[in-house]
Image: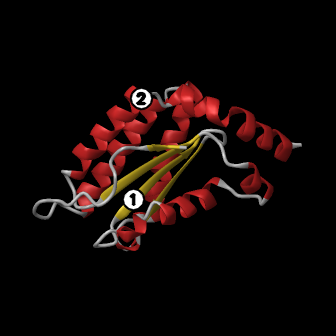
């Protein structure tokens, strides 16, 4: 029964959730936040917000973490010069946040840090304030990256700063 409800939630509400929670002004605001963030550290941040998974993925039993790993590859977050890309993935239908980091970041920052940021953002789902939750997540990710990866010279923007909404 739970699987059927999840399937329905993803297929019927996915697009609606993305449209409702991620407006054009929110996208513009987040793009600006990511740009400002990347000026304060050496890493690259990619943000993807997805209303719901596709039917085939649901039938295969795909979980948000699996999807985040897939997007990490397809968005080429792993392909930064120093292997210091960070993916912030939000699956609205599952109310799930996943943060996937490249091996350069993983070597320095414990996984528990990213899990904690994700859990804090998931709490914003309950209040329905997605914009504030995304803003806080980017802010927290930035603070961690500033601590471990100070800026080096003039940063090259290797990944798009504009959040991708699927």
Q: Give the x, y percent position of residue 75.
A: 45, 60
Nearest the eye: 31 or 108: 31
List x then y, in percent, for residue 66: 62, 61
Identified at 89% across, 43% down, the residue is 1
Q: Name the residue beneath numbered marker 2.
A: 24
Which residue is nearer to you in this view: 134 or 46? Answer: 46
Say what secondary structure mark 2 lies in: helix
Q: Is 103 on the left-hand or right-hand side of 50?
A: left
* C-alpha gap between disc 1 and disc 2: 23 Å
Q: Position of residue 138 (x, y in %)?
A: 36, 44
**Figure check: 116 above or below 94:** below
Furthest residue in direction left, as rendered:
153
Residue at coordinates 60% horizontally, 57% vertically from top-left? 67
x, y (%) of residue 10? 71, 40
Going by the picture, which residue comes out furthest to the right? 1
Q: With 1 as the anchor, is 94 left or right in this view?
A: left
Instruction: Give the structural element (helix, strand or loop) at label 1.
Output: strand
Q: Is residue 159 left or right of residue 116?
A: left
User: Sequence order check: which comes first, mark 1 or mark 2?
Assistant: 2
**76 vs 94, nearest the viewer:** 76
How many numbered callouts? 2
Q: Residue at x 31, y 55 (%)?
A: 144
List the residue tagged with mark 1. 86
In this rendering, the answer to whether 165 lies above or below 102 is: above
């Amino acid at each position: 029964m739970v699987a059927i409800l999840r399937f329905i939630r993803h297929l019927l509400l996915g697009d609606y959730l993305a449209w409702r929670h991620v407006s054009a002004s929110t996208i513009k605001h987040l793009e600006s936040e990511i740009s400002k963030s990347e000026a304060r550290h050496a890493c690259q941040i990619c943000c993807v917000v997805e209303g719901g998974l596709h039917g085939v993925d649901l039938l295969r039993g795909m979980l948000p973490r699996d999807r985040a790993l897939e997007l990490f590859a397809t968005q080429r977050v792993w392909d930064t010069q120093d292997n210091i890309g960070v993916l912030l993935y939000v699956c609205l239908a599952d109310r799930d946040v996943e943060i996937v980091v490249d091996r350069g970041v993983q070597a320095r920052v414990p996984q528990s840090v990213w899990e904690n940021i994700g859990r804090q953002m998931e709490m914003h789902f309950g209040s329905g304030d997605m914009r504030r939750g995304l803003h806080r997540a980017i802010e927290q990710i930035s603070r961690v990256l500033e601590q471990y990866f100070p800026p080096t010279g003039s940063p090259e923007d290797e990944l798009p700063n504009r959040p991708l909404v699927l």
